[in-house]
Structures are given as C-alpha cells and as structure tokens.
Image (cartoon, helix red, strand yellow):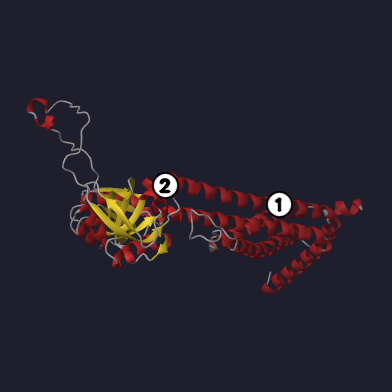
Amino acid sequence: MTRKSRWYNFKLVSRIAIALMSARMKQTVVAATGVTFSITMFITLLSFMNGLNGLLDGLILNRSAHVRMYNELRPDSMQPVSLVESFRNSYNIVRSVKPAGNSAEIRNSIAIMKALESDNRVKGVAPRVSAQVFFNVGNIEITGNIIGVDVEREAELYHFTDYVTSGNFMDLKNLPNSIILGKGAADQMLAEIGDVVQVTTPAGNKFSLKVVGFFQSGLGDLDKVQSYASLATTQKLLGKPANFVTDLMVKLHNIELAPEVAKEFRYIFDTQAEDIQTTNAQFDTGTRIRTLISYAVGITLLIVAGFGIYNILNMMIYEKMDTIAILKATGFSGNDVSRVFIFISLILGISGALAGLLFGFTLSSIIDRIPFVTPALPTIKTFPVDYSIKYYIIAMVFAVCTTYFAGWFPSRKASKIDPVIIIRGK
C-alpha cells in the first residue's frame, strides 16, 4: 500500500469513527466525561497527597542531617578484669559498667570538617554544640537544651530561617550572648523578644542571654525544650574553647548514599555516624505507604473509566451491526473495522485526558489557595500542593493505554462479524 493510499484509508476510517460517535453523542460525552473525571481526580489526589508528604517530610528532612557524626558516651570495652592474666582466657561479665573519662567532644573537628567538605558526595557540613541547661524562671527551673549553631551554614543547609517565626536569625551571629527560644519554651517563661533570660549550666554557672527571636518547628514537644544560640555563645556557656564541637551535621548531594557514607565515616574518623534512613525509618515507611495509596486510588479511577469506555463500545457494536455489515460488504476488511473502534476509543481517551489535565490543574490551584492555618505550622498559610509534571505525564500515558485496550477488545469482536449472516437476518 502506498503512502497516499494509507493516508486516504486513515482519513476514511477517522471520518467513519467520528460519524459513529456523532450518532451516539450522549454516550460519547458520557464516556469522555468518565475519563475526564478520573484524570482530574488522579491529578488532584496525587498533587495534594504528595504536597502533604512533602510538607511532612520537610518537618523532618529539612532539620535533619543526612549523616550525623558525634562522640557517643559509652563504657570502655576493655575492663581491668580482662587484663588479669588468670582471667584473660575467661568469659568475663561485668555489670553496671559506667563511662569513665569520655567526652562528647569530637576530636580534631576542624580537620574532619575540611576532609568532609573535600568529599564530592558531601554538599555541606554544619557544626553544632549541644548544651543541657536550666532556664531560671523565678524560683522554678525549666529543663532545656541549647543548640549552638553556625548560623549561616544552618540557614543554607537546614532551612533554619523557615522556622524562625519572630526576630532576625542573623542576630545570633551579630549579637553576643543572644538566644532564639523555642516557642513552647518562650510561652512557659512568658518571654518576649528583647527580654533577658537566666540560664544555669550543669556545672552551676549562670549566664544572662538576650532573646532575639522565636523558633517553631511544628513539633510541640521539641519546641518546649530546644533553643538556639551561636557556636561561640554555647561554647562560652560550657566553658569550652572555640574548637569544641559535639556534632557534625553532614548534608549529602544524594540522600540515598547516607547509610553507605555513614558506615565509611564511622570507620575513617573513629566517631559514631548515624544515617537519616536509620533514624527516621518509621517516618519514611509512612511516607511510602501514603504515596502508594494515592497512586492506587488514582489508577483505580482510570481503570474504572476504561471499563466504562469498554461497555459503551460494546453497546455501540451491537447497535451498529448493520453499519459494520455494510462496511465489510463494501470492501472494508476486518482490520479496517477494528481500526474504526480503536480510533473511537483513543479519541475518547485523549480528549477526556486533556480535559482532565486542565481540570486537575485548576482544582489543584484552587486547593493551593485554600487557607490552612494551624498553630503548629505558622509558616504554612495554604494547603500544600505538588505541581510535579510527572503526575501529568503518568496520567496521560495511563489514560491512553487504558482506553486503547478498552477499545481493542470490542474492536476484535467487530472485526469478526460475518456481514452475510447479519444482512440475511435483516
């Protein structure tokens, strides 16, 4: 068959298909509407659910290191009893062993940071100093934890500014002896920006710190005990030198490498290294389950729409037996008849899918503008929506595939109809 004849055949098949759809316009509109509704809900559901997943993940991932390096306080594995010659080959059990002489400080932290930053897998490193303190409120002491941070690194790597609801985070760096209180802790102490709070360290030293801002992570229990100060201020609280660091928070370019990198760093630098997958295993599982449910519901909607098209085409074949018989009697082959019904199915699928993509985007935009106000997340003003292009591609591809197969099965039946039997019956 020449190119010209193939083009003529295609035009003829398409014209017949359009004529059949026009004759049953109500059924055609119902079938296309089913696809449109399915695609709309598929797009909207995935955009909203994955936007919500992104919000929840951000509460954890944005504030968590991919690899956290620290020096764990633990008892020495070599006890004096093991050094005694007569017990050396024995299995010794020592109860209630306590750490002795260990420090939370990461030794050679500056050299380790330089080595980490030269690693191509590492995006950045933020040093921290953790200090357990007591906030003095009249005669009451409130337990708290002050995290000493490099302000600029925290803002760059861990979105620190997103969680500072009041005040300027750079004041931690510019103003000595300043602190950003967790919102829960500030409410307990009735503290306002500009107030001075009294802090007592475990060693009994007392310091005055000026409140320059409030921090709210969305995790209520955390905000009641955790506050932030600069590295220099926290080191001063503990009476430690400028190179004293208790944690190195490592951010990687690829989070999936975290378990492998943590194991490697643990061996190379002789410190404890904990990867984010191990730390947040339950949270990661919850995210995957929510995403799986979203896709399952969306795909189910598309399959239901496919069955609707299948039923409508089946009914059309039974109603158009005469037309099919005439087509085959006038020289149309079974394949030509099959192409007519597949063409109808694809028109319904593609037109319905395109309309669904438009309505899905519109509905997602409406949801994105609905106010979402909660005290736990003061920086979030509207419902979260993810506009990733992959949802639209998946919806379009799956809609075309579903409607193709929904038309393919009835078209096979139409191609096998014997025109002689139908005409003789008439």
In the rendered image, the residue lying farthest to the bottom is: 4
Asked if residue 120 lies left or right of residue 354, the reply is: left
- On screen, residue 62 versus residue 177, left or right, reads right
Residue 392: image quadrant is bottom right
Viewer can see residue 121: no
| Residue 2 in picture, x, y percent from top left | 68, 72
Q: How crowded is mark 2: few (under 14 residues within 10 Å), some or many (20 or more)?
A: few
Position of residue 127 measured from the top left corner of the image (x, y, whole percent): 27, 58
Tag 2: residue type? Answer: Asp
SS state under label 2: helix
355 to 205, vertically: above or below: below
| CA distance separating discs 1 and 2 | 58 Å
Instruction: Give the residue drawn at x 51%, y 60%.
Output: 380
Q: Is residue 103 left or right of residue 375?
A: left
The residue at which mark 2 appears reads as: 221
Tag 1: amino acid: Phe
Can residue 424 be seen here? The reply is yes
Assign the N terminus to one quadrant of the image. Answer: bottom right
Which residue is nearer to you in this view: 125 or 183?
A: 183
Query: Residue 398, position in %: x, y?
Result: 61, 57
Task: Name above or below for residue 267 compared with residue 363.
Answer: above
Q: Mark 1 or mark 2, which has the lower sequence index?
A: 2
Q: Nearer the viewer, residue 92 or 369?
A: 369
Task: Give whichever of 297, 75 is nearer the camera.
Answer: 75
For label 1, count other residues whose C-alpha is less than 10 Å away and answer few (under 14), some (14-19) or many (20+).
Answer: some
Residue 172 lies in quadrant: bottom left
Residue lying furthest front? 138
Residue indicated by mark 1: 409
SS label for mark 1: helix
